[in-house]
Amino acid sequence: MVTFTDSARFHSAVPMPGPVREAREAALGLAGFGILYPAALGLTLGGDAAVTAALHFAPSLLIGLLALGFRSGDASLRKSVLVLAAVQILLGLHIIGATDLGVIVVLTVLYVWGTSAMLIYLLRRPQAVAWFTDDGQG
């Protein structure tokens, strides 16, 4: 299915496969969370908490930026997002052990783990692998 946004923005009638489109949306949501969560911590707990959260969610921001290029079909984008999603999952382990915010941390880490795992799953689907070819032709 070609959405109006895809055809208007990218001047292409080649539809982005569902798993790739869903991964792009999840990645942008994760990046948005990576911006809003440190901002909320900064407002409620102070600057130190915001800086720590921003560092923990740096891979989320990079994932979101890379997802903006999914239309190109570049295989290096897919591989980079897979690696960053795995790094984000590992950082979740550090977040759980390094903070004492109670249920907030658990919910935050569960969201990040779930979204990162979903990105890994979606980008390993056959349709996504076929889209991200080594020659970047999508």
Image (tube, rainbow, N blue to C red):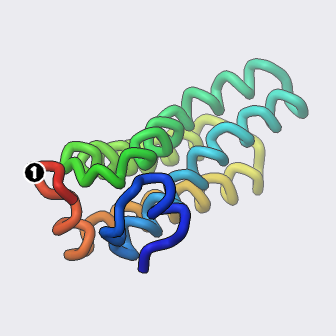
Q: Amino acid at mark 1?
A: Asp
| Residue at (35, 52) in percent of width and height | 70
Q: Position of residue 66 (x, y in %)?
A: 40, 42
Res. 128 image quadrant: bottom left
Q: Is residue 138 left or right of residue 119?
A: left
Q: Write the residue at 39% across / 50% down.
A: 85
Residue 114: x and y in percent read: 52, 65
Please give left or right for residue 129 compared with residue 29 in the image: left
Pick the quarter of the image with the C terminus: bottom left
Q: Describe residue 126's horizontal placement relative to residue 85 as left or right.
A: left
Pick whichever, 8 or 32, lies toward us. 8
Please identify the residue farthest to the top as the structure is shown.
47
The answer to whether 54 is drawn above or below residue 48 in the figure is below
Q: Position of residue 54 (x, y in %)?
A: 62, 29
| Count of residue discs | 1
Mark 1 lies on residue? 134
Residue in front for this viewpoint, 68 or 120: 68
**Other-residue count near label 1 (Cα within 10 Å), few / some / many at <14 / 14–19 / ≥20:** few
